[in-house]
Image (tube, rainbow, N blue to C red):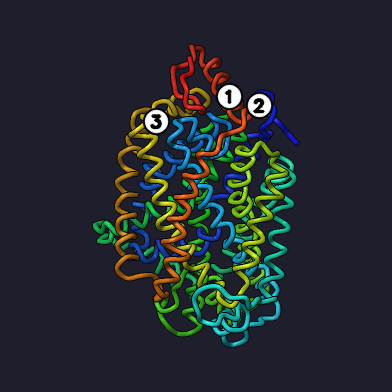
């Protein structure tokens, strides 16, 4: 297990390239492929690129810098990194761990679906009714809410395989597992998807699909909803605020160009989203052409795009089997690289809190997540549970904890100047006061609007027609339970070796900066001379 010279009990990425590949792999997930194209299309088309890029530059990349600094400065998991800012901030880190745990539990089954559909593409198993096949035959959903004990073998088996692969990668460690896996599968993902896009561009109707995506609706720029959609897409796609990038940054060597790495990751993620938009809408253009309807009549997103619309496209196009294999392999690779990073968040946090090795934490924490995932998701009601948890953890959980973290670090603790100094001490691209304004002013305004808007929608309209008890259990109740558990876990004392690592890392950074250690709150809540 590779370790750092300055922190003997902490693994490291042996190179900046390894970290960048892992971070890009985390950021490029299923949402890049099935969410961004629809958001762009429904939010002004080509005009959406303007608010999207502004959101990337004023929120996405600045927040990426912030979480890099938090993790790298403390060389620890999310809860301990926030505790290093102030003991009262520790629950913020644990809430992020809880969100990552919930997402990992349901995200794995979607990757399992993609595994199944890679094989289905060869035989076109869905026949003439992709929707009926997906919901009725493959998932075998009974249309009811809540939990079910009726397991679906066709979903269960690939889900188990996904968990075995992910836990094997994580058990190997940061460098031997995550880094090596990312170095192979991130480039492979890009090559596969690029091949898919090239094929899609030569389909009849592809140009009509691209015209539908990129035709600018300039009037949309006057709509606050479009700007919120742009910022929302950036927040969700960069894996910023639920502990992933903070955790990955904690495994970096002391001398690492943080801001340069953040710029590479941010623009690489957006570049892939643009590529995904081209590929998806070229394919949808072909689908509309084949059905002799407008592109607007076939546009979809999310699960429906991947497992209903694309099977329809595969059935209608020449050489559809090859196209289908490329598409679903792309989903598998994008899903696996993201899922590995998601699971690493609770593994790292529990290892820090208990003093366990990360291998032990992988077995215990990863194993428990796998058991819960296998018990709930491949059942006759798994889709309704997944849908509800996904909506509430993303739209309320991630947005809420992001807003809380920024207010705590930027306003209450006045910690942004400290983090900026740390970033500037190790990076080639230096940050000034504009960075602080973006993080502490621009971002919380947008996040606050998003959170209030979503709370009002869910409170007044519910979600997708699910019964109130279902939403209380898997939505509102889940978020409340995560908040309460985050507080309870923060009361448990930290092992001395975890606290010593944080203090040692900070002392080394301050020594290299050439100044005396500042008087600041230590992880134990006392004063450091």
Residue holding disc 3: 416
Residue 171 visible in the displayed image: yes
Q: Quadrant of the N terminus?
A: top right
Which residue sits at x=55%, y=15%?
Answer: 511
Residue 240 visible in the displayed image: no
Which residue sits at x=66%, y=64%?
Answer: 329
Check the image and report above or below for 529 versus 66: above
Q: Earlier in the sequence, mark 2 or mark 1?
A: 2
x, y (%) of residue 249?
57, 37
Q: Earlier in the sequence, mark 2 or mark 3?
A: 2
Residue in the foreground of this view, choosing between 436 and 290: 436
Q: Which mark is residue 351?
A: none
Check the image and report above or below for 235 versus 201: above
Q: In this image, 176 relative to 483: left or right?
A: right
Q: Earlier in the sequence, mark 1 or mark 3?
A: 3
Q: Residues within 10 Å of mark 2 (few under 14, many from 20)?
A: some
x, y (%) of residue 280?
51, 67
Check the image and report above or below for 494 versus 24: above
Disc 1 to disc 3, how far (Cα)?
Answer: 19 Å
Secondary element at image label 2: loop
Q: In this image, 95 relative to 214: left or right?
A: right
Residue in the foreground of this view, choosing between 137 and 389: 389
x, y (%) of residue 15?
66, 34
Residue holding disc 1: 505
Residue holding disc 2: 7
Depth check, mark 2 against mark 3: the one in front is 2
- The total of numbered circles placed on residues is 3
Q: In this image, 357 relative to 353: left or right?
A: right
Check the image and report above or below for 55 versus 192: above
Do callouts 2 and 3 mark residues in contact (Cβ within 8 Å)? no
Secondary element at image label 1: helix
């Amino acid at each position: 297990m590779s370790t750092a010279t300055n922190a003997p009990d902490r693994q490291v990425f042996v190179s900046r390239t390894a970290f960048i590949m892992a971070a890009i792999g985390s950021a490029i997930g299923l949402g890049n492929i099935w969410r961004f194209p629809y958001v762009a299309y429904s939010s002004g088309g080509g005009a959406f690129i303007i608010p999207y890029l502004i959101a990337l530059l004023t929120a996405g990349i600045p927040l990426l810098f912030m979480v890099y600094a938090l993790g790298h400065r403390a060389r620890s998991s999310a809860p301990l990194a926030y505790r290093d800012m102030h003991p009262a901030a520790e629950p913020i880190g644990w809430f992020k761990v809880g969100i990552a745990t919930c997402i990992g539990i349901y995200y794995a089954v979607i990757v399992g679906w993609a595994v199944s559909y890679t094989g289905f593409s060869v035989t076109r198993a869905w026949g003439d009714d992709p929707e009926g096949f997906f919901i009725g035959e493959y998932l075998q959903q009974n249309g009811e809410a809540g939990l079910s004990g009726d397991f679906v073998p066709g979903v269960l088996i690939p889900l188990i395989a996904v968990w075995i692969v992910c836990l094997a990668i994580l058990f190997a460690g940061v460098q031997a597992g995550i880094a090596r896996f990312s170095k192979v599968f991130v480039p492979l993902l890009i090559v596969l998807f690029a091949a898919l896009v090239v094929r899609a561009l030569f389909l009849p109707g592809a140009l009509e699909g691209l015209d539908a995506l990129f035709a600018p609706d300039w009037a949309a720029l006057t709509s606050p909803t479009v700007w919120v959609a742009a910022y929302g897409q950036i927040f969700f796609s960069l894996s910023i605020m639920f502990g992933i990038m903070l955790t990955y940054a904690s495994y970096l060597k002391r001398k690492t160009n943080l801001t340069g790495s953040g710029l590479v990751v941010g623009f690489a993620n957006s570049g892939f989203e643009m590529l995904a938009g081209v590929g998806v809408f070229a394919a949808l253009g072909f689908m509309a052409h084949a059905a002799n309807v407008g592109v607007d009549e076939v546009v979809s997103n999310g699960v429906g795009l991947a497992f209903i619309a694309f099977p329809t496209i595969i059935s209608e196009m020449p050489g559809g089997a090859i196209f289908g294999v490329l598409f679903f392999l792309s989903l598998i690779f994008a899903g696996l690289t993201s899922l590995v990073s998601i699971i690493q968040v609770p593994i790292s946090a529990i290892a820090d809190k208990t003093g366990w090795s990360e291998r032990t934490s992988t077995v215990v924490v990863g194993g428990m997540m796998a058991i819960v995932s296998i018990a709930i998701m491949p059942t006759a009601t798994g889709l309704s549970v997944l849908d509800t948890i996904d909506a509430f953890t993303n739209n309320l959980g991630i947005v809420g904890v992001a807003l809380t973290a920024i207010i705590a670090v930027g306003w209450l603790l006045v910690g942004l100047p400290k983090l900026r100094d740390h970033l500037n001490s190790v990076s080639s691209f230096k940050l000034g006061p504009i960075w602080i304004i973006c993080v502490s002013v621009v971002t919380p305004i947008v996040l606050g609007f998003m959170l209030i808007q979503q709370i009002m929608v869910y409170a007044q309209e519910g979600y997708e027609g699910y019964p109130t008890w279902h939403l209380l259990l898997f939505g509102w109740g889940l978020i409340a339970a995560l908040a309460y558990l985050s507080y309870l876990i923060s009361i448990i004392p930290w092992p001395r070796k975890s606290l010593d690592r944080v203090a040692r890392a900070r002392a080394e950074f301050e020594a290299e900066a050439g100044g005396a250690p500042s008087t600041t709150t230590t992880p134990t809540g006392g004063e450091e001379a």
